[in-house]
Image (cartoon, helix red, strand yellow):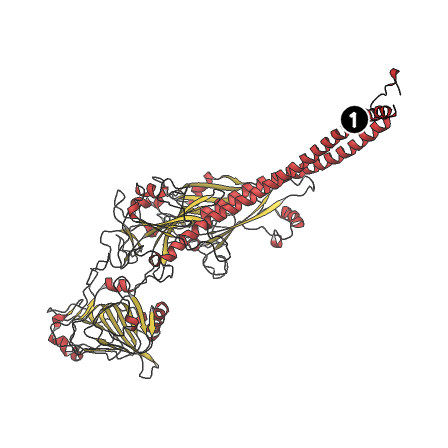
Amino acid sequence: MLARREYVKELRTKRRRKPEAGIVLLIAIFVLMLVSIVAIALILSAGTESALTSNYRSSAAVHYAAVAGLEEARGRLQPKNPDYFNNAVAGFMPTGGTPLALGQVRYIVNGGAVNPANPGDPFPDTEYESEFGAAPTPGNTQTTPSISGNNAAGIPGPLYKWVRINAVTETSLNLQVSSTNPNDSTTPLYYDSAHVDSHGVQRPSLIVSTTPPSTAVQAIEITSLAVLPNGSQKVLQNVVAPNLSVMQVPAALTMVGSGVSFSAPFSSAFYVDGNDHDVVGSCNPGGTPLTGLGYTTMGDLSGTNRPPMVSAHPGNYLGLNLPPPPPLPQPSVNDIATVITANLLDVTGLNKVVHDLGQIADATSGTTSVSDAAPGPFAGMSPSTPKTIVVNGDLTVSGWNNIGYGLLVVTGNLNFDSAASWRGLILVIGQGKFTSASASGGTGDIRGGILLAKILDSTGAQLPAPAASSYIQTGNGTGVYYSSCWIKAAQQATGYKVLSFRELPQ
Amino acid sequence: MRHRGGKREGGFSLLELMTATGIFLVVVGAAFGLLIASQKAYSTQSQALSAFQEARLGLDQIVRDVNIAGYPPPGQFSDSPSDHSSFAETPVAWAPGYSPGTSFSPCAIGSRCTTPADYDLIIETNVNPQAAGSKVKWVRYQLAPGGTTLMRGFVDKATDPDDATLPTLVPFVQNVMNNASAAQIAQYQAIYPTMFPGGAPVPIFKYFCGVPGKQCTDPGGNNAPANIRDVEVTLIVASAQVDANTGQPRLVVLNGRGHLVNPTQ
């Protein structure tokens, strides 16, 4: 009985509490709702601020990511760069003055899965088709990975997806480079630093030519696509060209200084020829002939000082005659003081040439000898891999019956085997003495040019002005032949300069 | 209280009800107070953000135009084209003294140039080079004296950059306070002491002509417009309404820098 009473009491108590619990719940719901509204408002506000920051960041970031792609490509075009394209993929870029053919496409891809030439790729290169009218063909496409991946700290590199490198035409650039209509779609464009326009004004520019002059270099287009994870994307494009400050010589054989001496074989096979010789790669000779044998001090090598072998074979000293004296033929042996560039006439300028070339030399050495058995700095030269070699001292080339390619600088005496040949420039600036002899006679030739200047005395001290340089050839040999194309090929680009920059609308 | 049958009436006493209502009102009041303050802050903030976002987009556009200025440069053509609107003779046009095809006499930035100037810049470039028949345009940015709206306009390159672009200008960024009145600047300085150095207006455009560490207008700064290689852009933008909580104007400084890549040759 008691238990039942207790049960009824408990039940009544529960019935009394039930309405109170409902009110508390209601109040709690209200409070929670209000707090939630305030919280949501705050979150929305913070969200807007994040969006603003993000917009700004991505706009700047995507631009610089694309620029990073352009710069990687521009840098890796240089053969002296350790990351040079051809070091990663053999034959990636043509060498030896050969142009990159139209239709040949090279890509740097940033991320293993990226394949811009595939239209189904998440980041396809649709821009190429808009420029050239067709997508790149797989057979003409080569790809290399970017070198700017994650760094050692795991920080990701620039977020460009791919960079394309190709030749350009008027049509692809949508520019009428020449005044001829309509735009040409089949001739690759070149950049000619010595271009003279139709008004006779020298203005370096792009040119349209199937036979570009020796002063022209191919214009290359670099296109970079950058895409950020948030979808921002940008396509930037450069047209670049090798920065060739090609050193020019005023004669096939230039002898700078006062009291110069020249001695060569009395041989009908020996020539000093200022006419422009040899096609090299896409480079075509054909400029104005230069002097064959040039000197810079009036009276040297002329009149009574004319070397007897020149008088014996005047027809072997070919090139420009200054002034043309009748009757012809006259040997092309001229005072070139008025046509040589000023820096090659004074000691400071000549010293600077040696110093500057030393900075970019592929090989430097002190006094040394070169032979077949021990080629030393001469090892590894070929038409497509010329070398800049600086010898600070004497150089003896003996028993090396090969062809050298590039730019050879010797500050001491150069003894050059008359059976050896050279394609490019030989500069003997210092002691200024070139001697050529060979036990076997020899049929070697120099195609390009030679410049001799004596600016040091026998102790190696600098002279106040260029003194008597000398050329003495007692072996046979076939002589010195000017070639603007070999000179050009010998001098590698010190970089690629930007000819134009544009952003392509997306 | 008991009804017949002994059943007890459920519910609350008056005291309980008033206590619960009181607590409810206090909580609700506090919450609404917070909400209203938050709403005001949100409203002010979003207005400011919207103004600044507009300015940010404007800044990005200016920097982009500067980056691509001078396309295509003269060196892209083997013969100087007779149609001057097919190439950019200079990345930055100027007045007086520049009239393509007739006169080409450089003015000095900071003295004789009416443009480029602190609040005036005319870019010469082809903004859409792949489009068929596209021409080089003059793109102008100008903050008129005493004005607070940065204007933008563009037109095909013609004979006089100043005359040709003026009629095309339309509002681009509102409430640009770089060249505010002296009274306004004094008011802003009280709130943002470093925003207007020396209490002077702040140029929107500063020009650098390739001499390290020097503006074009500095001695030895190489101050011809064709020499400009970098343009530093500063926009000081105010929100449309004052801060609802403090009653003070809200300003922000946006900075950008454009680099001219295209050569002038």
Give the class, few, some or many, for how many residues have Cα within 10 Å of label 1's Cα (few <14, many ≥20). Answer: few
Please provide percent x and percent y for residue B244. 68, 39
Q: Is residue A112 left or right of residue A426?
A: right
Q: Secondary structure at mark 1?
A: helix
Which quadrant is the C terminus of chain B positioned in? bottom left
Question: Image point 22% across, 54% down: which residue?
Answer: A211
Q: Which quadrant, please, contains the N terminus of chain B?
A: top right
Can you identify the residue that label 1 sits on? A18
Image side of residue B222 versus residue A199, left or right: right
Q: Taking A314 as reference, is A281 left or right?
A: right
Identity, as a three-letter code, of the amino acid under mark 1: Lys
On the picture, is A221 further left or further right than A198?
Answer: right
Q: Can you say whether A149 is above or below A330 in the image? A: above
| Chain where mark 1 sits | A
B20 is higher (above) or lower (below) than A244: above
Q: Say if A464 sits above or below A59 in the image.
A: below
Query: Could you say which is closer to the camera, residue A400 or residue A26?
Result: A26
Tell me if residue A101 can be seen: yes
Q: Residue furthest bottom?
A: A459
| Residue A13 occupies quadrant | top right
- Residues B110 and A420: in front is A420
Instruction: Choose top left, top right, bottom left or bottom right for residue B12.
Output: top right
Counting every numbered tag in the picture gives 1
Outermost residue on the top side: it is: B4
Q: Position of residue B149 (x, y in %)?
A: 55, 41
Query: Would you say residue B145 is visible in this rendering?
Result: no
Q: Looking at the rendering, which quadrant does residue A422 occupy?
A: bottom left
Q: Residue at x 30, y 43 (%)?
A: A132
Across and down, in percent, residue A480 comes to 19, 70
